[in-house]
Image (tube, rainbow, N blue to C red):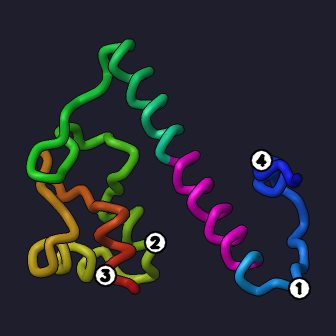
Amino acid sequence: MVDVRTLMQPHPPLAFADPVLADLIERARAAQSVAEAAQSAVWSYIDQCQQGTAAPELDGWPSLPDHPDLLSVPEAASRASRSADTIGRWCRTRGIGKMYGGRWRVSIRRLNDTLA
């Protein structure tokens, strides 16, 4: 009997004669990767809560402008290979940004969705 955990361990891709088995293993690895990312986010949030630095998200936006999921307009412009004016316009018209203290902060997720 094959231990499923052994198949889930990181290793070079294996070639399976059974395409269904190969697909199932690939899907399980992808799901494991998503679960590990979620677990990491949970532990990070717990650490932030214990340190008193966690802040709840309101209307889908972090409550603090220095949240790691937010970029400044120049950072977003550099990442997107666009001008700061374009990013500012996208903040207003496409909803990729939110004003914090009179300055735009850009959601990485929303920026990536816009670029996709």
Whether residue 11 is situated above or below residue 96 in the rendered picture: above
Q: CA distance from mark 4 to mark 3?
A: 38 Å
Q: Classify mark 1: residues with Cα within 10 Å, few (<14), some (14-19) or many (20+).
A: few
**What amino acid type is highlighted by mark number 3?**
Thr
Q: Is residue 68 left or right of residue 17?
A: left
Residue occupied by mark 2: 78
Q: Is residue 110 left or right of residue 91?
A: right
Instruction: Tell me the residue at 71%/82% (across/down).
Output: 20
On whether residue 24 falls in the magenta region, the answer is: yes
Instruction: Tell me the residue at 33%/53% (across/down).
Output: 70
Residue occupied by mark 3: 114
- Residue 16, given in percent of the width and then of the height, sits at 87, 79
Residue nearer the viewer, 55 or 31:
31
* Chief SS of the magenta region: helix
**What amino acid type is highlighted by mark number 1?**
Ala
Front tag of 3 and 2: 3
- Residue 98, given in percent of the width and then of the height, sits at 14, 58
Q: Classify mark 2: residues with Cα within 10 Å, few (<14), some (14-19) or many (20+).
A: few
**First to last magenta residue range:** 22-37
Q: CA distance from mark 1 to mark 4?
A: 20 Å
Residue occupied by mark 4: 5
Q: Quadrant of residue 19?
A: bottom right
Q: CA distance from mark 3 to mark 2?
A: 15 Å
Q: CA distance from mark 3 to mark 1?
A: 40 Å
Residue occupied by mark 1: 17
- Residue 83, given in percent of the width and then of the height, sits at 34, 81
Q: CA distance from mark 4 to mark 2?
A: 41 Å
Residue nearer the viewer, 24 or 67:
24
On whether residue 105 falls in the magenta region, the answer is: no
Q: Classify mark 3: residues with Cα within 10 Å, few (<14), some (14-19) or many (20+).
A: few
Q: Counting residues from the N terminus, which is met first, the one under dot 4 or under dot 2?
A: 4
